[in-house]
Image (tube, helix red, strand yellow):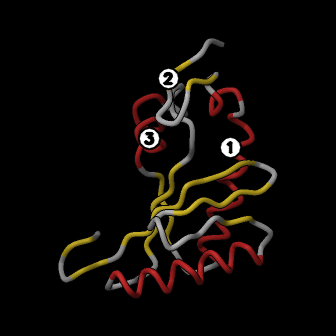
Amino acid sequence: MGIVACKHTFQEPRLIRERDKYLSALDAIIPAMVKSGVTPMLCYGSLLGAVRNGEFMPHDDDVDLLYHDGSTSYAEMLANRKKLSDALVAMGYTSDLSDNLVNFHVWDERGGLDLFPCWEEGTSCM
């Protein structure tokens, strides 16, 4: 399969090699997020790969989901982010939510996903 340069490391194209595993992770996490009251969507390299390649990009090394939970401020997003993380943990996911980053990772036996919250400030989404 070869080695590709990813953002985080040099590796085999893991998302391509483990495609079914990551698609299964997406199939499970999206309904779990909706059940938790957020609207998830592909973003960043995951969205670009889906649109441009029709699959994961060989040099991408993670699956990115942007979500909106109705927050209208940064502070509200932080509180809601914690609620989402807790809800996903209660559903069997592991979360690395921290105060150091806005985004966080969740994973289970199928694989991990990067979650990026967005919120509205006035007329702009952040």
Q: Position of residue 107 (x, y in %)?
A: 71, 57
Indicate left or right for 89 with 103 as reference. right
- Percent from the top left, x then y, of residue 20? 73, 37
Marks 3 and 1 sit apart, C-alpha to C-alpha, by: 14 Å
Mark 1 secondary-structure assignment: helix
Q: What residue do we see at 59% from left, 16% from top? A: 3
Image location of residue 36, percent across then percent down: 62, 79
Q: Is residue 56 above or below residue 108?
A: above
Secondary structure under tag 3 reads helix
Answer yes or no: do the residues labelled 3 and 1 have beta carbons within 8 Å?
no
Comes first in the chain, label 2 or label 1? 2
| Residue position marked by numbered label 3 in the rendering | 45
Residue at horizontal 46%, vertical 28%?
53
Measuring from the top left, give residue 119's x and y in whole percent: 35, 76
Closer to us: 86 or 71: 86
Left or right, 113 with respect to 7, comes to right
Q: Earlier in the sequence, mark 3 or mark 1?
A: 1
* Residue placed under numbered mark 1 in the picture: 22
Residue type of the residue flagged with mark 1: Tyr
Name the amino acid, label 3: Gly
| Circles 2 and 3: CB atoms closer than 8 Å | no
Give the side of residue 79 with respect to residue 33, left or right: left
Q: Which of pointers 2 and 3 lies earlier in the amino acid sequence? A: 2
Residue at 66% across, 61% down: 29
Quarter that holds the N terminus: top right
10 Å crowding of disc 2: few (<14), some (14-19), many (20+): some
Between marks 2 and 1, how big is the CA–CA gap? Answer: 19 Å
- The residue that disc 2 covers is 5
| Amino acid bearing label 2 | Ala
